[in-house]
Amino acid sequence: MTGDQELVFVALGGLGEIGMNMALYGYGPAHERRWLMVDCGVTFAGPDLPGVDIVVPDISYIEDKLDRLDGIVITHAHEDHYGALIHLWPRLKAPLYMTPFTAGLLAAKVQGEPGAGKIPVNVVKQGDRFPVGPFDVEMVAMSHSIPEPCALAIRTPAGMVVHSGDWKIDPTPGIGLPIDVERLAQLGEEGVRALICDSTNAVRDGVSPSEMDVAADLTRVIQGAKRRVAVTTFASNVARIRSIAIAAKAAERDVVVMGRSMHRAIEVATELGYMDDLPTFLSEDAYGYLPPERVVLLLTGSQGEERAALARIAAGDHRNVALSKGDLVVFSSRTIPGNEKAVNAIVNKLAEARVEIVTDRDALVHVSGHPRRGELTQLYDLLKPQALIPAHGEAMHLKAHHDLAKAHGIKNTKIARNGDLVRLSPGRLDIVDEIPVGIEVKDGMIFGDLEETGVQERRKLSFAGAIVVSVVVDARGDLVGEPQAALFGLPETDEDGDDMEDIVIDEVIHALESIPKNRRKNLDVVAESARRAARAAVRDCWGKKPLTQALVARV
């Protein structure tokens, strides 16, 4: 390797946040690096992005280098790792590699998305090794809360880097292969230049329980129920779905499935053999004729999604399914930060209907798919990395992981954020450049940045409302009639009880009359004067500055 053949890493999403994972590995001289993309995920909009459906990384940096993007490898099929493909792959058009389960879910997603084109996939299996440009990529079997999760061993002439993806150490994951501890140890013996590693649970001591432990508790809870049982979990957690089905069978109950994403995951998992030896899943049409003591309802909505099945049932407005006093709802999930209010709203509605509720605070009905501190140190010991970059976490998670690695003897450890271009080799980890990063949003049928989609103005609307003023002048610049005003999201009156609309109109008239007559012939001058006057009138009596627009016509 010559001195200018560097191996670098940069995240376009996923560092300093949980979600929207997208990493780039570059190899070669700075001016002509070849690139490998790992994961292409989304995140979901919070209240700070009103009206937005999903958020994806800004890919403009790599779009400028598409002739040097040799491939995209997906570690697993969670939305925050593969969900942006349907939106971004048509712009990237690089060779795409993923396991059969991920490929199946992607195909189903494309089929259900209006106008989506086919996305060609190179299907690879856990354990496979294949070239992507100058990168030699190996898919190493890991354990996680979804089938077929992989770490990537990425070999280059500048050394090998291991990208962990999402993982935990679980010898009994319920379905699929367990984490390949033997192979990880072999990679450690071969020599790992750097480990880019999941930090989600780096603040938690110990090790995570196994999925088989959850299956045992779910069986106990379902067998102890007297009436209907509803279990909500992530549709992608096929091992959990299988555990629920086994528990239902042990309790002599049938599983009724609700939710399009749940049906889609079960269909793909069934095609791949992950649902072998289970009783047939029933559609929601069966719910009405099954005795209450024979039902396990498997449904989406564990995060309080307002359009999901659980939210509609809790509100009492689902046409086929209802829950009542004595029924049991099991939240086989953990609430994602930011979703607490929506989840609590559903729990309260269920409680009002005197429905029993079980969460992971009451029984082991959920376990995280991410490593705690004890598992992180086990991975360090297996891989023996020379250097480490904490990934997949907010600031507190990255800091906890950084400190843990340092304490465990990995001195060459660095906290990086989205946009930090880190040289992995040669030499010590070093941030050598900063590239532009950001987000794009899907807003209805429109894709773009916050300005293009109008989200920035929508934020202002949510805080201070809007005013539209209409003014008509004649050819001499005289007002024709009284200006009109429409107020949206503003108080009807000020603190003295005066009508807000009248206040605005009076101030607009006063401002327009103060303009010299010859300047009133300029419609732009009139419009700006009316806009400023309306906005100032509201600011003076309300203390806020609404979005304000003035429309001027000449007759």
Image (cartoon, rainbow, N blue to C red):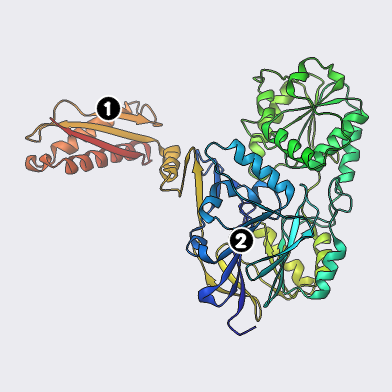
Q: Give residue 475's position: percent from left, percent from top.
A: 8, 34
Label 2 Cα neighbours within 10 Å, binned few <14 / some 14-19 / many ≥20: many
Q: Give residue 298's position: percent from left, percent from top.
A: 77, 30
Q: Is residue 178 shown left or right of residue 51?
A: right
| Residue name at image x 85 percent, y 54 percent | 178
The part of the image, by quadrant, that contains residue 552 is: top left
**Mark 1 sits on what residue?**
502
Q: Is residue 16 shown left or right of residue 197?
A: left
Q: Residue furthest bottom?
A: 3
In the rendered image, which quarter contains the C terminus? top left
In the rendered image, which quarter contains the N terminus? bottom right
Mark pair 1, 2: CA separation: 62 Å
Q: Residue furthest top?
A: 289
**Mark 2 sits on what residue?**
71
Q: Give residue 57's position: percent from left, percent from top.
A: 54, 54
| Residue type of the residue flagged with mark 1 | Asp
- Residue 410 visible in the snapshot: yes
| Residue type of the residue flagged with mark 2 | Gly
| Residue name at image x 54 percent, y 47 percent | 87
Q: Is residue 147 shown left or right of residue 181?
A: left
